[in-house]
Amino acid sequence: MTTHGSVVHALAALGHDARLAIFRLLVRAGHDGLNVGDIGHELGIPASTLAHHLKSLVEAGLVVQERMGRQIVNRVDYDVMQRTVSFLTAECCVGVKLTRDDAA
């Protein structure tokens, strides 16, 4: 998938309130991540619904999952997050010329 396509996929995944909340929680959790039960408890999302949303985030490449014994730990893929943010900041204003009046 091209960078553009992967960014579109990532943004589409983040376009749902629950998935955005999950992603933000995982960003705050840092590299240690959180298990599924902790995410559900923190956000009040039922397990079956949470599994659906996590699957979307994993498919978009934003979240990686690792089985640790009986638990599944979820972590943000910070490289993908950074590429997404970089794409937005690099491409959002290309070709747009602002005047001083526009900026005010």
Image (cartoon, grey):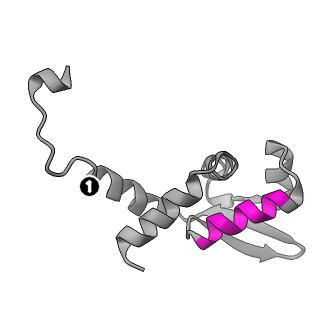
Query: Residue 18, relative to residue 72: is it above or below?
Result: above
**Residue lying at 65% horizontally and 45% vertically, measured from the top left:** 17
Residue drawn at (78%, 76%), measured in percent from left and top?
67
- Asked whether residue 98 appears in the rendered view, the answer is yes
Q: Percent position (x, y) of residue 23?
A: 63, 52
Q: Main secondary structure of the magenta part?
A: helix
Residue that carries the numbered disc 1 in the rendered image: 91
The residue positioned 41% from the left and 71% from the top of the image is 5
Q: Position of residue 61 (x, y in %)?
A: 55, 70
| Range covered by the magenta-colored residues | 49-59
Image quarter in which the N terminus is found: bottom left
Is residue 57 located in the magenta-colored stretch of the structure? yes
Q: Is residue 102 above or below residue 55?
A: above
Residue 78 percent location from the top left of the image:
51, 61
Q: Amino acid at mark 1?
A: Glu
45 vs 80, nearest the viewer:
45
Give the quarter of the image for residue 2.
bottom left
Residue 50 as seen in the image, left or right of residue 99: right
